[in-house]
Amino acid sequence: MFATKTVLFIAVVSLLGTFSSAAVDTFIYGGCSQEKYFPGSPYESNVNSLLTSFVSSASLYTYNNFTTNGISGDSSSVYGLYQCRGDLSSGSGDCARCVARAVSRLGSLCAMASGGALQLEGCFVKYDNTTFLGVEDKTVVVRRCGPPVGYNSDEMTRRDSVVGSLAASSGGSYRVGVSGELQGVAQCTGDLSATECQDCLMEAIGRLRTDCGGAAWGDVYLAKCYARYSARGGHSRANGYGGNRNNNDDDEIEKTLAIIVGLIDGVTLLVVFLSFMAKSCERGKGGK
């Protein structure tokens, strides 16, 4: 299972406090398995077919899962799902655009990886070579809390009201809670049963209460569900950003990683060059 593998996770929690108005393609987190597949292999073909199916299906449905079976006896089967945030519709095109963007970014972030997952503000995509469909997974992926707001009975009452409404078992797989300026949202993936969904959301909400109970905002993403709350604009004010924040977090991360890799390569070449020069000098002295 993807969750049991060694995984590299890159996380940037959305800093826009109003979830519904944040750009749906804002990067939240991405993760890739360390296991790789060979270019041109049947598995690569199946991964590409699966991701293409995500984009095609998202124009009609806000959730779907797929299994691309390999040839009997080989290990090229791929399992995957996509899901859009509950307030996005397939008819408006928002879901399809988000999924297309997520697939594109996942392809860049997890090139040749046997498994990968990517969460944007408006949608989630995941694939793996071992089935995870219908399997509950409460692994913590992202957990971030805003600055403490201190004791304020009104604020605490509103926060308890919002978080409590997210915990309501009758809320379905996508839940929204609002109390004054405070708002919250929670959702689980569509492959879980109602009982599994409730169990996952209660875990996320419990962590939200425990870890971020006195914070201005909080985000808890588990492998199969998430729960969040924020005062309007709370994330942006707490982190020093204005309302017109650039939504290219993933691009900046990729640039930063490229710079780091470039520096490492540069240092390596410098070490090799100096080693070569030292050996040349030694040979020169030995020749005298």
Image (cartoon, rainbow, N blue to C red):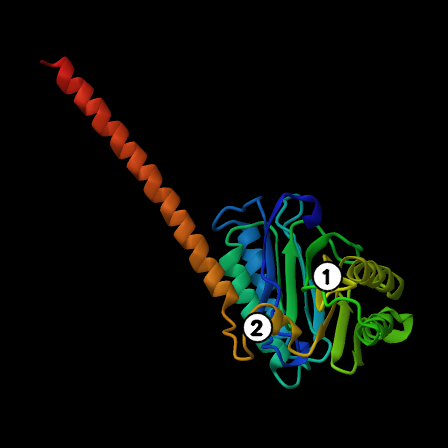
Q: Are marks 2 and 1 in contact (CB under 8 Å)?
A: no
Task: Give 105 or 279, whichever is nearer the viewer.
Answer: 279
Distance from the alpha carbon under mark 2 to that under mark 1: 19 Å
List x then y, in percent, for residue 17: 65, 75
Q: Which residue is drawn at 86% across and 64% down?
A: 198
Q: Give the label on residue 220, or none.
A: 1
The number of callouts visible is: 2
Q: Residue furthest bottom?
A: 92
Q: In this view, does 181 lie above or below 268?
A: below
Task: Identify the residue position indicated by label 2 in the image.
Answer: 25
Q: Inspect the image, locate mark 1, and give the three-letter code of the amino acid beneath it.
A: Val
List x then y, in percent, for residue 25: 57, 72
Left or right position of 11 against 286: right
Residue 21 position by quadrant:
bottom right
Nearest to N terminus: mark 2 or mark 1: 2
**Local SS, label 1:** strand
| Screen quadrant of the C terminus | top left
Task: Give 150 or 140, whichever is nearer the viewer.
Answer: 150
